[in-house]
Amino acid sequence: MAHTRTPNARFTKPIKTEITMVGNKPTPKANESFRIRLTGSLEPNDVREAIIGGKIRATTLRTMRRQLGLNIEDVADVLGVSKRTVSRKETNKATLSATEADRAYRLARIADMAIELIGDPKRAFSWMQTPSVYLGGKTPIQMLDTEVGTDLVVESLHAIAYGGVA
């Protein structure tokens, strides 16, 4: 089990990761962080290349969506596309555009952070879909459609983790 830290992370606990090797390529296990499952790495340059290089598949996003208990509409709203676009890309095993992939990574980052700071995946996934007064009555998932909204979600997570009300 390797311990890694995300560069410039806003939280300081290490993320536990298990990596298996397939040939020369490290492959994440099922209990791996959503960011690694989505992009294959936590290294910023590798993540950026995966995002802008069209390497993130809609099928990987579908797996993440299902594990988080989200429906197509939730993901479409985060990605800024129609439900039909998400459905078509998942069915055709297409890759995400750079913008879609960047927003999918935002969702993965927040899911990982919620698990780390809340401590239990089921509670974290439930929290992500529960309206919050701190977020103006919206769910954390609904706030991920903008970077400002995402910042509010991060603040809310920190308040929960470090003794505040959110």
Image (tube, grey):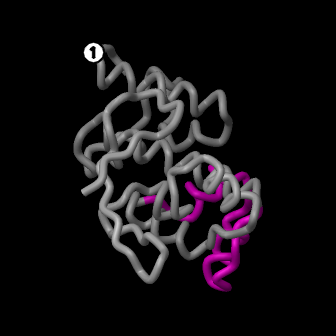
On the image, the x and y values in percent for residue 114 come to 37, 40
Residue 144 position (above or below residue 107):
above
Asked whether 50 falls inside the magenta stretch, the response is: no
**Residue at horizontal 33 percent and vertical 45 percent from the top:** 15
**Residue at horizontal 50 percent and vertical 30 percent from the top:** 153
On the image, the x and y values in percent for residue 125 come to 35, 49
**Residue at horizontal 53 percent and vertical 31 percent from the top:** 8
Quadrant assignment for the N terminus = bottom left
52 relative to 147 in the view: left or right: right
Quadrant assignment for the C terminus = top left
3 relative to 38 in the view: left or right: left
Q: Which residues are magenta?
A: 70-97
Q: Quadrant of residue 53?
A: bottom right
Circle 1 sits on which residue? 163
Q: Quadrant of residue 86?
A: bottom right
On the image, the x and y values in percent for residue 155 come to 47, 22
On the image, the x and y values in percent for residue 90 come to 61, 77
**Residue placed furthest toward the front:** 24
102 relative to 123 in the view: left or right: right
Badge count: 1
**Residue at horizontal 51 percent and vertical 36 percent from the top:** 7
Asked whether 72 falls inside the magenta stretch, the response is: yes
Which amino acid does the dot numbered 1 rest on? Gly
